[in-house]
Amino acid sequence: MWEAALYLVLFVAAFAFVRTRPAVALGIALGAWLVCYLVSVEFDVRVVALAPALGLVSFLAGRHAKDPRATAIALTIAEIAGVVVALTQRGGSDTALAVTSGIGVLGVVPWAFGRFRRQFAELREVGWEHASLLERDADNARNAERARLAGEMHDLVGHELARSALLVGALELEPTLTAQQREAAKTARASVTAAAERLADVMQVLRADEDEPVATIEEVVARSGLDVELTNGRKTAIDGIIARTVHRVAAEALTNVIKHAPGAKVTVSLSANLELRITNGPAPKTQAVGSGKGLVGLAERVALVGGWFEAGPSDDGGFEVRAKLPERPRARTMPTHVRRERTEEEIRKSAKRTVLITSVVCVGIAIGVPGYMVFDAATSVLTPQQFERAEIGQEEDALDLPLRTRVDNPLGVTAPPGSECRYYSTHPNPFDGNRHDLHQLCFRNDRLVSKEWLARRSG
């Protein structure tokens, strides 16, 4: 009962850690199964009961591992450790073959399917993201079209308002009008002029992205008030929308430096091909807590013009913001298409690897296990005639013995004190009803001291 409880605790721990620490969980499950099998060296009820749990942990480890290398190393270590223990302590090469087959079927194959499942889930996530971006691009296109239409309406309505103001002004100067009529015309002219001015103000807001002046990278750095080492390799003019994006990224990054790394050394560089890099060195910890929305907004802004954006800690303990911008704004969907193509390629490779791993393991077991059983039995046969001719007290060199012994040394068989026993097959066919029977010959000081036929037909 205590052994069953221990295995239960180990596998519960494996399931608890498999999402956050897949390599650790897989190592725990593999270790528990190996110990359970190597203790008895047979597929008893305990080993069989733990097999589904090991397969499920292996699948989940492959499914949740971001980097497959750690879990692959865990499988390799378990395989090597099991084979070494089997060859040196528990049964020999037949036990090692069983360990290899068990880890292959219960560990490697489910793990490969878990990796495939992760790639498939990533492809599905990219698909939903792609659909969301298409909807957002459609909204952006509608908004841009509305702004353009508003501009056209401003031109038309503004022209009509100006014409109306001119006509009302001419009416105001008509000499036949009474003073009261002249005052009414003056009021109408003022109202029309005010309406035209308000319309112009509204359109100025709508066209702010196109009309307002854009600060250069030097001006952004100067306004930050930081001691910045600036390198501007861009000598030619920058497209208006791209220039505003450069302004936005630089301003937000420098603001973050002021908040989170005051006093740190800051470098800003803009290359000729519009690669912007803002780096700050390490600084004492501050109490400022950011929401993270600023960097998310920068990534969104850069992606909207067709560039790529990265932000994260640098090797020296500081922080780095990088953005690569195109010469002209490009369609937002381009980066998503590229990512989708790459993900589809990865899932195709993952599917091929899964099929290949499963096929190799299955073919290896289907061919290797029977083939090894035939080789082991056929090359270690001690015939009944040879067994009968062997007499107690004979020297080992005088006996007619096969070159090889059987590898499945039986557990729990007693031998004469101080002797070394060897075991031989009784039949060359490892698949008949007598395949478990063995001839036992025990030697002391190179002389035969005991021989026995071990009938193990019950398994």
Image (tube, rainbow, N blue to C red):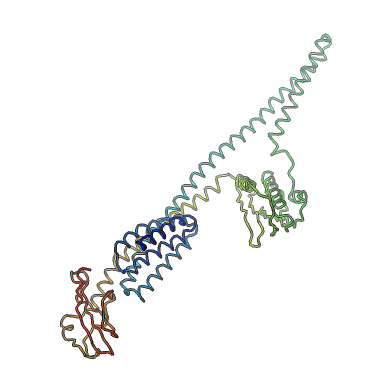
- Residue 349 visible in the snapshot: no
The C terminus, quarter of image: bottom left
Camera-nearest residue between 39 and 328: 39
- Residue 263 percent across, percent down from the top left: 74, 57
Q: Quadrant of residue 178?
A: top right
- Residue 59 percent across, percent down from the top left: 40, 56
Asked if residue 368 lies left or right of residue 324, the reply is left
Q: Image point 74% across, 46% down: which residue?
A: 215
Q: Quadrant of residue 329?
A: top right
Residue 417 vs 321, above or below: the answer is below
Camera-nearest residue between 390 and 80: 390
Q: Quadrant of residue 137?
A: top right
- Residue 72 visible in the snapshot: yes
The N terminus, quarter of image: bottom left
Residue 376 vs 141, above or below: the answer is below
In the current view of this chain or complex, which residue is farthest to the front? 1
Asked if residue 12 lies left or right of residue 400, the reply is right
Asked if residue 6 lies left or right of residue 243, the reply is left
Residue 146 vs 431, above or below: the answer is above
- Residue 180 percent across, percent down from the top left: 82, 10
Residue 445 vs 294, above or below: the answer is below
Query: How many badges with numbers are in the image?
Result: 0
- Residue 448 percent across, percent down from the top left: 23, 87
